Amino acid sequence: MTDLEADLRKVVRGEVAFDVTSRALTTMDASNYRRVPLGVVAPRDAGDVAAVLAVCRSHGVPVVARGGGTSIAGQATGTGVVLDFTRHMNRLVALDPEARTAVVQPGLVLDRLQEAAAPHGLRFGPDPSTHSRCTLGGMIGNNSCGSHSVAWGTTADGVRELEVVTARGWLLRLGQGWAGAPDGLRSLVDGELARLRTGFPELPRRISGYALDALLPENGADVARSFCGGEGTLGVLTEAVVRLVEAPRARVLAVLGYADEGAAAEAAAGLLPFGPLTVEGMAADLVPPGAAAGLPRGGAWLFVETGGESESEARARAQAVVRAADVLDARVVRDPAGQRALWRIREDASGTATRMPDGTEAWPGWEDCAVPPARLGAYLRDFRVLLTGHGLRGTPYGHFGDGCIHVRIDFDLLTGAGIARFRRFSEELAELVVAHGGSLSGEHGDGQARAELLPRMYGQDMVALFERAKAVWDPDDLLNPGMLVRPAPLDGNLRFAVLPREPVDVAFGYPSDGGDFSAAVRRCVGVAKCRTTTVPGSVPGAGVMCPSFRVTGREEHSTRGRARLLHEMLAGELVTDGWRSTEVRDALDLCLSCKGCRSDCPVEVDMATYKAEFLHHHYEGRRRPAAHYSMGWLPVWLRWASRLRAAVPLNALASVGTLAGVAKRLGGIAAERDIPRLARETFSGWWRRRAPAPGPGRAGDLVVLWPDTFTEHLSPSVGRAAVRVLEDAGLRVALPPTLRMRGRPVGDGRSRSAAALLTARRGRVCCGLTYVSTGQLDHARVVLRRTLDLMEPVLETAAPVVVLEPSCAAALRTDLPEVLHDDPRAARLAARVLTFAEALERHAPDWTPPRLDRPAVGQTHCHQHAVLGDAAERRLREAAGLTGDLSGGCCGLAGNFGFEKGHFEVSAACAREQLLPAVRDAPEGAVVLADGFSCRTQLDQLAGARGRHLAEVLADHLEDEGRER
């Protein structure tokens, strides 16, 4: 233990963490920069903050305050001690509806304040796109804004008083009339009145530098306002009194379509006289495939939100905007769900923009400069010329009504030549912004990305005044040094510099990242959507990512945290033992492999795949956990049980507590779990003895029904029901071949010789899911190649492959072609995979399902949500009269995860978040739907509820309607 760590532990009541994991998690924010801290402290109160500052001052160690870690300019990283306010100092202290104020701690997430204020018809005005995870302290530090700033201004406009601790330990209460000003600040301002009155550009989004003009007498000598945007360099915030604004009772969204972003930018300023709540702009390049269906015709759009006391009033204002706007097309959206869907496209742009349309990486650095709104169109034209001149690409979007532009640019930050171009471009763009009367930062602060260039905006004399102001607040330069004044170079401390330059030897193909595992890890840019938490009353079905973080609230259990640890593992500076790292292993241990990040993360980080890759290398040549053998090899054990006709005796033994306990201990299974019962007859056994379905329906399309392990051995009723429904729909059902031919085909390339038939080997198809999820990728490859051999005759036909278990369908769609990326048959089989509902929709479009006319509850399987999509399932439920939406989230069992020893509490907590409440609060007569075996098992074991596959529900009602077989 270092002297610094020991001294901190003596005086701090909160957590003091100098371990590798804690440090690795805070090396980066959402910027291009990386700094390795000495340690992390989670203070409990202002006293802890003062104690940390005193100890660090005595040791000469800098201090960096950190909230959600979503800063884009690098100001939430540092080499000393990082203060993490999200752990303890995250409360809403008080809310006064009459005074329209709230008292908040710096670690409070913005959405928690908005939820508390909403019942009173109030809200905090600024709302960055990261509102679900950014903190009030971070917003004050950066003077954040968001989409509603045209109506309600910046964070500084919403601040009344601030309680801060200075680097010398003074506790100050900042406000107007010089309240709380440190000694020397007033005399500094009085001596520079002329410079302060003339040295700041007039525009709504001027965030760069210190807001010293707020200290002018005509501006109320507002010390609290001048502190906003200080990026943690002046003092450490411990509490804030913020102003709330009245939220409109009704909102309507007008989406205006333009030919390109230039035309949209030219139009934005002309809409401000209509008093809109937002004027946001984005271009078609940032719209994900399929999402454009909800947008009007055009190549770029303005999102103009209007408010009113009633929907009719808000709609009238929106229609007035549409009439006044010169547009190609427009759409006025009134329903809240439709508005949320469109806003989600805009809010995800900060992540979507990190990839160009061709997959090339793009990075922040010039994320949010701002110009006067009337000059935005001209600025964007010049910006495009500058981009082209440097051979760069980027897609601008952002707060067009405020003249603030976000853009991620395809800088090459991996090579010396690329970094040199990054610097030249930055210097020239700074000149361009200043030429248009703009600010280098319009929202996210200067940080390391732009502080070096502040003299180009303000001149050397004003920057020297900033340095003097910093010295008044922090004479020891203890707080966040290198930011704003005496800055670090904009091309130093780049996070990519430590990564290996040669591709890492890996098992998966990583097709979206050119086969490069480092590039896959680089996908995580830190926007931290995975840190979003849910609360009671939140919208069901809002997403899956990240269930373990929502349960534990710890950064290492978020997708971002795990990606940071993998980054540091590749860097080898902090995490020094590579694939053998226990820090990475422990962080990944609570990853459910739900695949939610694959769809919910704006940059499609795929932590389930990264986890499987890591486990593959971590245990290579070593003994694995018992659960990897018991559950990873589940298909083998269940096939042997079937061959030996051992289902009945095994079920009997599992019902004996002591014997089951021994089996669970040996198998690494949680003691709290019941061992699922084996079916007395497998699905394939039933299939072999059943009579073929008669009737004209057998002339329909051929579909191959996949007998996954769960359906085959544990839930054969699902398979039987699916056959019943598919045949009722007129389809011909077959199962995959069980003979694997040896030798080459003869004649027409399809026929086999008699010798080949005689030497054929029997086998069963398998998606390899259990081997992949436990990182046994060598064995997964063997199993999957054997499966492809068996499926070759099917691949020679046009028959689709219908998979009933969502996790197995997802494995065949994604894991199969990524594990066997060198086998073209893998992609062919993946393309054939259909869900039960997709098969009915595509191959029996005229079939009418039975009418149930009942409510439905349950949960969309996490792999269905993330990989397969559930649009066809929704349409099938609607056609069958099953009403209501299924919940989102993850059931928590997640295959082997919830059965593994040590995971039960997290598993159950995941289920309690959405699934169990949805079933508990179900209306009378509701059907409980759960297409996944894990989901059904979790419902049974935790709630005593019987979940059913949609095929089972439909098959039962076919019988009720008496349809002929």
Image: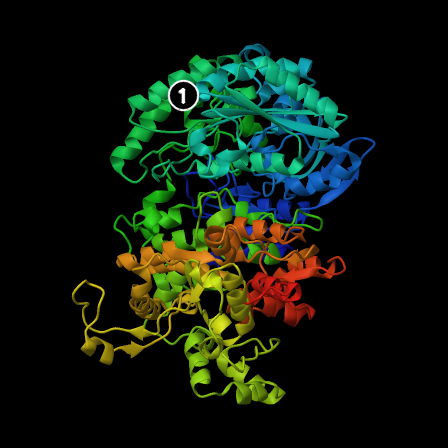
Q: Residue at x 54, y 45 (%)?
A: 529
Spot occupied by residue 171 in the image (x, y as percentages of width and height): 68, 38
Spot occupied by residue 667 in the image (x, y as percentages of width and height): 49, 80
Q: Nearer the viewer, residue 410 or 586?
A: 410
Count of labels shown? 1
Q: Residue at x 25, y 50 (%)?
A: 502
Residue 585 shows in this picture: yes
- Left or right of residue 156: residue 706: left
- Quadrant placement of the C terminus: bottom right
Which three-letter amino acid code belongs to the residue tagged 1?
Ala
Q: Residue 475 sits in which quadrant?
A: top right
Residue 357, above or below 587: above
Q: Nearer the viewer, residue 809 or 428?
A: 809
Q: Residue at x 37, y 40 (%)?
A: 494
Q: Residues within 10 Å of mark 1 (few under 14, many from 20)?
A: many
Q: Secondary structure at mark 1?
A: helix
- Left or right of residue 802: residue 617: left
Query: Which residue is the extreme one toward the front?
Result: 696
| Residue at the disc numbered 1 | 430
Residue 3 shows in this picture: no
